Image: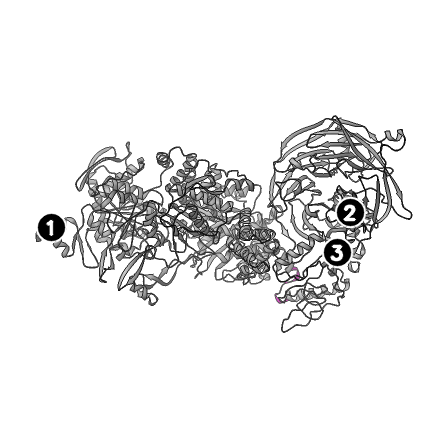
Amino acid sequence: MLTTESTSLGLPDFPIYSLQALVKIMNQVPNVPTADLITRLYPYETILGKEGKTAVTDILKKFELDHSPSRGIRDHIADIQIEGAEGLVSVVCAGQHHHIQVPVGCKQTIDTSEFVETDYHNELLQNMMLSHSVKDFCIIGPKGSGKSAVVKTFADRLNYEIEPIMLYQDMTSRDLLQQRSTQTSGDTYWRPSPLITAAVEGKLAVLDGIHRINPGTVAVLHRLIHDRELTLFNGTRLLRHDKYDDIKDSEQLSDDDMTTRSILRIHPSFRIVGLAEPPKVGSSSGQWLNPELLSMFLYHPMRPLSTQEEQHVINKLIPDVPEIETLLQLSHKLLSSTDATLQSIATSLSTRQMLRIARRRAAYPSESLYDAVHKACLSRFLPRLARTALEQALSNSDIEKPCIDSSIDQIQMSVTCEIKHEVLRIGKTEVNIHTPDNQMKVPDVLFYDNPQHLSVMESMLKDFLLGEHLLLVGNQGVGKNKIVDRFLYLLNRPREYLQLHRDTTVQTLTLQPTVENGVIIYEDSPLVRAVKLGHVLVVDEADKAPTHVTCILKTLVESGEMHLSDGRKIITHKQGQDQGQDVTSNMIVSHPDFRMIVLANRPGFPFLGNDFFGAMGDIFSCHAVDNPNIDSEMSMLKQYGPDVPEHILRKLVLAFGELRNMADQGLLSYPYSTREVVNMVKHLQQFPEEGISSVVRNVFDFDSYNKEMQDTIVKTLHKHGIPIGARPTNIDLAKVYDLPKPELVSHWHVSSPGTGTQNRTALFNCPVEEKPLNIKGPVRMPIESFPLDRHESRALRFSEEQAYWMIPMSENNVIADVAVTKAQAHSSQTDDIIHIAAAKPIALYTMNPHGQYINYMDLYDVFPTMSSTFKPRLKLAPLGASVYNSVVLHEEMTNMILTINTETGDLTRFDTSTLIETAIDKFTRRFQTSDSGQGYYKMCREMAHTPEGLLVFYKVNEQSLEVINMLEGRAHSISVPFNVASVHLVDLKKWLIQDAQTQRRYLLEKTSQLGEVPNYQLLPIEEDVLNDKVPIHGKIDMATTSRLDESTLNSALSQDVSSPNRIVTTRGVYAGILEGFPDLQDTSVYSIPREPLSEQSTNWKDPLRHLAVKPVTGNVEATVTSLPESGQIVRALSTWQVPKKVFPNEVKPMNLSGYLEVADLANHKLRYIPVPGPASSSPYNSWLLSITDVNMVMSSMSNDGLVTVDSGGCVRLWETSIGNLTRSLGQWRNMIGGDPGKLQVTYQRDSGKEATLPKHGKVDSTNDPHVGGDTWAGGTGGRSTAGLGGKGGPYRLDAGHDVHQLSDAEKEAVPEHIKRAAREMGQKAFKERLREINMSEYDADLYESYASNVRKQVQSLRVILDSLQAKGKERQWLKNQTYGDLDDSRLIEGLTGEKAIYKRRGEQEPEMGSPQQLPKKLKLVVDVSGSMYRFNGHDGRLDRQMESVVMAMEAFEGYENKFQYEVIGHSGEMYDVSFTQQNAAPKNNKDRLNVLKTMQAHSQFCISGDYTLEAIDNAVKMITKDEADEYFVIALSDANLSRYGIAPKRLAEVLTSDERVNSFVIFIGSLGHQAQAITKEMPSGRSFVCMDTKDLPQILQQIFTSTMLTSR
C-alpha cells in the first residue's frame, strides 16, 4: 500500500502508524476478521471510486486479506460488567466469546431511552466496542441513518456522559480548545472549551460534523488523539493520566500544585467519537477524509438500514402503522437507484423521516401516504426533473394520489377554525389553549382565514401536537410569517423572533455581546430566551444564513443540547430533572414547551438563498406553503378589500395565478406572490379612484428593462382583462343605425270553444294517447378535461365582445348547437353553464365560462356512423330544477334522445313506442340529406328548464306531436289535423303551431288533466290584415316565451299599453310584436319589416359546392335569439347578408365569421357587430362562409348575455344591452383610472378622410406624438405614412408612443391601388433590409418558417438562461474570518469580543445567483443521419431538430458570457461534423439559416449508418479540455438505435462516462414507441422524448436545474 506503484494510482496514504491499534484488537480477539480491521483503518470503499476500490481489492487479494470468514452467529455484545473506571465486556466474534477491558464513564444516572436493536446495530456496537478499547473512532454515515442514536446507546451502556460538540465550517482552533473572555472586573481570561472540559472530566466528546470543519482546524487535535497530550493557548498542558500520575508522584505534588503549574490530568475514560457524512467520491470539494485525518481515528462506515431492519425499528417504536411496508419499499428503491436524482430524493426519506411519517400516520391514519411522501420530500419545490422522477417512483410503488372532493362547499366545511370552551379546533384537529406567562409576546396580526391557509395550519398543528419542530418553505410573499403568527395567536403561544442574514455567525445566532464599563456582557439571543422560557422560536429567512452556521441548530433540535459561546450549555428538561440540585449556573435547562418554527424561501433563483432544506430538512417536519388557490385567494382578498369590485379581484387572482404557473414553467423568473396582490387590493381599497392599470404598473415596472419579460407580463395581464396601456377613449362599439318603428299590420283573433257550429267546435279537441316511455341506461361515459384558456377581449379597447376561448376540436369537426343552463335555474350554481354539441364526431363540451376546465364527452360509440354521407343534426336542451346538471341531446335524423349528466357522465336514452322505427327506415334516414327539411324530428326546448322539464317533439310535415315530461318520466302523443311546419312553446300550456301547407297558425292549449291523459284544444287563429299593410308571413323562426316588461313594450310601440305580449321573427321582419298574445282572444300584430334574407350568396355559382368538407349546421334556431330584459332580437348573419351601408366604400371584410344583427326594439336602433373569423379551422372555411348561410351558433345567457360559437370552435361572450354596456364601460374606465367625466356610450365612426399614395413621411426630430394626419412618420391612427394603427401606410414604424387604432372596416375600405402601392413600397424596404444582411427573399421566408414556430420557446429559454447560477469557485476576499488581515470595517465588533474581524484571500463557493466568472459550455450533438431525412415525412423529425437548433441559436444570442455553445453532428459517415464554432456563434439570420441548410444537405446525401455513441463520447471527452463553470452535452437523436445494434445500456454508459459532464439525450423522432421503450431502460432523468418543439424549453429547464441537486 506504500509502494510507488500504489502512490501512482492516486490512492491516499495508508496510515501505517495506526496498525498498532489493530494489533491490540487482534491480541484481545484473535479471530476478528483481518479484512474488517483493515476497512476500519483504511475505509477504501467509502473514500475511493471504482478504480481505486479495484486497486485496493487486488492488493488485499494478493495477501489473502480480502475474505471474511462465514459467520453462523452475528457478532454482538453478550454482556457488560462495570467496576469503577473500567468495564469488562463480553463480545461474540465469529461465534466465539471473548472478554475485553474498556474504559467507562462516570455518570451516576442511567438513561432509559428507547433504542430498538437490530442484528446490524448489535454488530456495529460490538465493532465500536473493540475500537473503543484501543483508540478513538469515527462513524461515517448519511444523514438520518441513526449515527447519533447509536452513539448515545453506546454511551449509555458504558455510563458515559456525552459532551456534544457541533462543528461548523468557520470554526477555529480557538473555538475547539480555548476561548478568550472577560471577567466582571474587565480582565480577560481563557475559558476552556467543551472538548477540554470533557477531557478533564472523562466524558465522551462527540465531534458532530467532521466533514464540515476545515482540515487545518482538526489538525490541532493530533497530539490529543495520538499521545493524549495537548498544550493550550494560555500555556496550560494536558497530560495523559499515567504520565500525569508519574510526574505527580515523582515530584510529590498535589493536584492543586499541578493545577497551579498549569498541568491538567486527562481522565483515563476520556474518548473522542467523530460523526461525519460520507465523502463525495470524485469531488474535489467534498473529499474531507485526507491522509492526515485517516490516521486520527478508526472508521466505522454506517449504512442505512435495510427494509427489514427499518420495518423492525418502526414496528417496535410505533406499532400498527398502516402502509408502512409500501413506504419502506419506496424509500429503498430510491436509495438503491444508481441515478443521482433519485438518490438525492432518497435523502429526504431517511430513517429519521420514516419515524416521523410513521408517528403521524399512527396518530392520523386517515391521511394519505402519497401526501406524506410529497410533504417529506418537499416536492413542490423540487426541480421538475426530480419531481417527475418522484411521481414515477410513487406510481411504480402503487402509491396513488387520493381522490379529493374539490367542491368549495366541502372545503369550507372541512377546514374551519374556532375557539370554544378554551379549545382550539382547526379542521378536525383540536388542542387546549395554552396559558402563557407573558401575554405580550403572543403575536396578533391582521389575518383573514381562507381554506388553504387553514389546511396548512391544521397540518402544522398535527405535527406540533406530536412534539415536532416545524420548517415552512415557500416562495417569498406567500404568507409564511402571517400563517405562523396566526397559528401562535390561536394557540396563545408566546413568540421569540430571530431573523437571519448572510452575515449571521454562530456567535450572533446564540448570544449578543455588548460592552458595559469595559466588560463584555453577553445578552441572551431570542434563541436562548425561547429555550429558557418555553416560548416558540420563529427563525425567519433561514435560507439567507450560511448552512454551516444554521447547522449548529441540529443538536438543539435533535438532542435538546447546545453549547453557547460564553461557556454555558443548554441541556434537556429531562437532564435537568435528573441532575436536580447539581444544575449549575453554566447550565440552561430547556423548557418542555420550547419549540422552533423555521421559515425559509425555496432555494435558488430568484431568492438566491441557500438550500436549508437540503442541509437540515430531515430534522424538521416540513411544510410547503404555496400561494392560495383561486377560491381561497378570492375569499382572502374580499376581506382585505371589501369595497373593491369582485370582477377586479377575480382578474387579479387569475392573472397572478397564470404568472405563477409561467414561473413554474420557466417562462418567467420571478414567481409573483400573494403579497403583491394583497398590497394592490389594499391600495385599491384606500384609493378607489385610482385605476387598476396604474396600481398593477407599480408592481411590474421594474421588469420594463427586459423587453421580452415585459411583453410576456403585459400579454398575460391583457388576457385577463387588465387594461395596461389602454386609454379611456379606446372605445370600439358597433355603428348605430335607425330601426324602423313597428307598425300595426293586422289583428289575430283566437277562436274560443264556444264560438261557431258544433262541428267546428269538435275540431278543437285533439286526440291524446298516453305512451310508454322506455328508459335505457344509465351508462357512464368517460369525461375528459381540458384547460379553459379564457382571454378577456377588453384589454386595450372596449367593445361588445367580453371574452373568448377555444374548445379542443379537430379541424374537420362541425359545431352543431350551443345551449346554456342559466344560473337562475337553480341555486347552487352561481354561473351559467355552456353546453356545445359537435357533429363529426358527435361530442358534447360543457364548461363554466368562469371556470378552469372544459369537460369533453366523446359520443362516437353512441352514434356509430353508417355512412360518410350521414350528416347528424343535433339540438341541446338544458334541464332545470333538480336535474340542472343534465342536458338532453336530440339527433334529428335518427331521432335519438339522450339525457346526459354533465358532472358524472351518466347517459340515459329515452324512447317512446311511436318513435320506434324499422331498421330500413333508420338506414334510409342516414342517407337522407339534412337540408331537405323532410322526414326528421324537431325538438322544442323552450320549456326544458321548467320544473316539469317539458320537451315537445314533432315530425316535420306530419300530423303528430310527442310530449315528454323529463322529470316525471311520462310521455303522450297529440294528433293534429294538418301537417306541422313549426311549433313554438310561447307558454307552458299554450303553443303556437303553424300549418306547413297553408301557413295558417293555431294555438294549442292544454285545458285540463283528466286522469293520466291531459286534454288539448286546438284554437284556430284568424288574421285580419289592415289596408295597404304587409302582414307577417312565412315560417316563424323564433317566438319568445316571456313577455316584454311594460316600460320596454311602451318604448317599442311608442304608446302606453299594458297587456300580454310575445315577439316573433321571420326572415322577412326584424321582429313582430304580438300585443295581447297568447292570453287574450284579440291580438294586435306590429311588424318591423326588412328586406327578406337571402338563403345563399347570390354571387356564388360553384357547381361543386356540395363537395365542401365542413357542411353547415342546419340549425336555424341557433342563429336567432331574444334578450327579453333589454327588448333585443339578435340574429347571426353571414357577411354577404349584411346591408351594404355597413361597409365603407362597399368593401366587405373577408376575415369574419359573420355579424350579429342586434335589433333594439326599445330604443329603435339597429347594430351590426362583426364576429372575428375562426382562429383555426378547415382550409375550406373561407369558401364555406362565402357559399353558405352563417356557420355560427349562439344562445342567450343570464342577464341578457350572449354566447356564440364559430366553425373553428371559438367561444365568444357578448354584451349588447345598452344598460349592461354602460355599466361595463364605467367599470372599464375605472380600471384604467383617472376622472372619467360624464359617462356615455360612444360608437365608432369613420375618420372621413381618404388615404393618398403611401410615403415614409417626415421625421420629427423631437419625436412628439402625432395622431391622425398624413405628414409625419411614426404617427398613429393616421393615413398614408409609416406608423401604427392607421391605414394606407407602406409599413409599420414604432416611435414609442401610445397607439390610436382605426377600425378594421375603415382599413379595408382603402382603395385597391393605394393598397397595392403600399405593398410595393413595403416590399422595397424589406428587400433593402435583406440586401443589408445578404439574405434573399426566399431565404427570409425559409428561415421564418422555422423561427416562427419556436418564437415563444426562444423567449422561454432566455428566461431560463437568465436564472442559471454559477457553480464554479472564484478567488476573492473572504470576510468574517477569524485570522488574516484586520478588516477595518469591523473594528467596533472587535472591541465587543467578536472574533470574526479579519479578511483574507481565498476560494469561496459562489453565492446562489452570483455572476459566473467562467461560462458554461454546451455541445449540442445533432443527428444528421439518413434516417432523419428519410422519416421526416413520417413525423417531421428533421424539421423538429432544425427548429430546436434555431431555438438554441436565437436563445443563446447575447448570453456569450454565460454560455458557449457548439453544434456538432453525426451521421453514417462521421461523428464530428461541425456546424458552428465554439467562439464564433452565428450572428444573424443568414448565418443561422446556413447552419440549417448544411444540416439538411448532410442528412440528404450522407450514407447510411450510425455514430451516435461515438459522437456523444467524443463530445464528452472534448468539452472538458477547457475550464468552464459547468459542462453540458445534449444529444438530439431519433430512436432508430436498434437497427444498428445499439443497446440502451451502452448509451447510458457513454452518457455517464464523465461525472463532470452533464450528459443527456433527447429523442425527437420515433417509429412507434421506440423512444419511450429506450427511455424506460435509461437512468432516470438522462433521456427525454420530445415530439413537439414547444416542449423543448421545459426539457432544457429540467436539464439545467437538475444540476442544483448535485454539487461537484
The kind of secondary structure element at disc 3 is: loop
The kind of secondary structure element at disc 1 is: helix
**To which residue does mark 3 refer?**
1149
Q: Earlier in the sequence, mark 3 or mark 2?
A: 3
Camera-side residue of 847 and 288: 847
Give the label on residue 246, or none.
1
| Residue sitting farthest toward the right | 1027
**To which residue does mark 2 refer?**
1189
Query: Do the numbered discs 3 and 2 sit on residues whose CB atoms are within 8 Å?
Result: no
Write down the quadrant of residue 823 in the picture: top right
Residue 297: percent from the left, percent from the top?
25, 48
Is 880 situated above or below 1447? above
Region of the chain picked out in magenta, as a range: 1331-1338
Q: Residues within 10 Å of mark 1 (few under 14, many from 20)?
A: few
Query: Do the numbered discs 2 and 1 sit on residues whose CB atoms are within 8 Å?
Result: no
Three-letter residue code for mark 1: Asp
Left or right: 14 as drawn, with respect to 1180: left
